[in-house]
Image (spheres, helix red, strand yellow):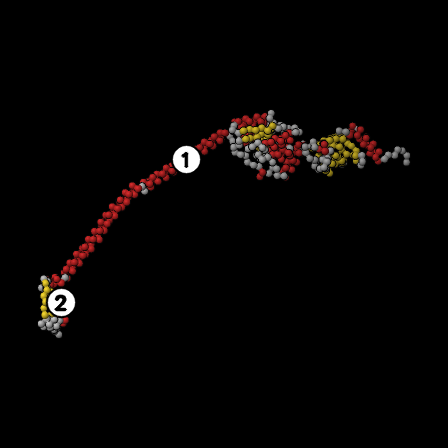
Amino acid sequence: MTGMVYTVSQINRMLKGKLDGDPAFQDVFVRGEISNFTHHMKTGHFYFTIKDQSASIKAIMFQWNTRRLRFLPQNGMNVILFGNIQLFERDGICQVNCLDMQPDGVGALAIAFEQLKAKLAAQGIFDPAHKRPLPPLPKKIGVVTSKNGAALQDIRQILSRRYPVAELILFPVLVQGENAPESICAGIAAAQNAGLDVLIVGRGGGSLEDLWAFNDERVALAIYNSRVPVISAVGHEVDVTIADLAADLRAPTPSAAAELAVPDRETILASLADVRERLAQAAGRILDANQSRCEALAVRLEKNSPENRCRMLADRLDSLKIRLSQQESLLIERPAARLRQNAAKLEALSPLKVLLRGYAAVFDGKQAVSSVSKLEKGDRVSIRFADGSAEAEILAVSPERNEP
């Protein structure tokens, strides 16, 4: 065997040098399907294989590049990689050092949106049971938005027209760019201690990239954890963000958010007029009822007044006098009549009447002698006449004999 003999390390080093030095393998785009994807949580690196129907090649994406991605790669996802073809010298393995990655077909932002939406939905961030009602008559309204944006002016205009009594407090933040999510979260945090009744978080319209800060997980969690009810108002009606889903209420535009946050002044005035009318009617009914009650009490008072009671008692006394007089007549005249009648009967039956007719009554002492059989010869008797009496001695007793 003749010729140059190389070690494995030398061969791998030579191949690495060729690949690193050849512009054809630098800044290349590689299309394929992701498989064997691994996210190393400690380092933040991505390890995966990119393949097509007939071949595959390993790939690595370091943490300082992965953090710029707006979506999380998954197995089976078709992507286009941008990077350099390198040789892993130790193992002699050719791999793609991925500097950037884009979905092949569907945009990265759309994929990132759906991934975050599914993740937060699984955590209950969009649960309707967590959403709170807005206060009907807010006094202090907070707005988390750009201090120079059209959204703030629209909100101010609506509030001044519909509900000028509300106090508007601005929490100025960045609404687009890399630092916007952190700024929005800080604005929401500051609003928690301002004594607000409701908080509007949003901005005016723009591209999907312009609105992307409101699709950030940190913003969604800040809205979810807010102690103040939140209205999300991002972009136009067709724009739906993660912030919209996490908020207590979603408004299609900032102007609509202001209208949803407060009642209309004219509606309030109409309601007040209605309440005033109902109060007047209720007061009238109460007055009428009290007047009727007072009249009834006056009648009762008049009826039960001392004068009226004295008059009633006097009338009753007169009536009793009449009845007593009537009863007196009955109680006296009737017995008197019966007495006269009985006296007449007694007089008719009186022994004196008999004596006046020529008869006499014989007494043996105090006892009347009713039969000759009670007398004997020599008895002394008293003979009572109508006009006096006489003493007599019985000379003989002659009883009458009844004929057989």
Residue 199: percent from left, percent from top: 57, 32
Q: Please tell me how crowded label 1 is: few (under 14), some (14-19), or many (20+) other residues with Cα within 10 Å.
A: few
Identify the disc placed on residue 283. Answer: 1
Circle 2 is placed at which residue position? 363
Q: Write the residue at 11% across / 69% down.
A: 380
Magenta-colored segment: predominant secondary structure: strand
Residue 221: percent from left, percent from top: 62, 35
Instruction: Specify the amino acid type for callout 2.
Output: Phe
User: Which of labels 1 and 2 is toward the front?
Assistant: 2
Is label 1 in a helix, a strand or a loop?
helix
* Residue 193 shows in this picture: yes
Going by the image, does 219 lie left or right of 31?
Answer: left
Residue 253: percent from left, percent from top: 58, 29
Residue closest to the far bottom: 404
Going by the image, does 276 lie left or right of 352?
Answer: right
In this picture, is 188 found above or below 328? above
Q: Write the residue at 23% across / 51% down.
A: 327
The residue closer to the viewer here, 324 or 174, is 324
The residue closer to the viewer here, 44 or 389, is 389
The residue closer to the viewer here, 47 or 278, is 278
Q: Please tell me how crowded label 2 is: few (under 14), some (14-19), or many (20+) other residues with Cα within 10 Å.
A: some
User: In this figure, what is the number of numbered marks?
Assistant: 2
Going by the image, does 226 lie left or right of 41?
Answer: left
**Residue 153 found in image quarter:** top right
Instruction: Specify the amino acid type for callout 1.
Output: Ala
Range of magenta residues: 360-368
**Residue 38 found in image quarter:** top right
Residue closest to the far top: 148
Residue 1: percent from left, percent from top: 90, 36
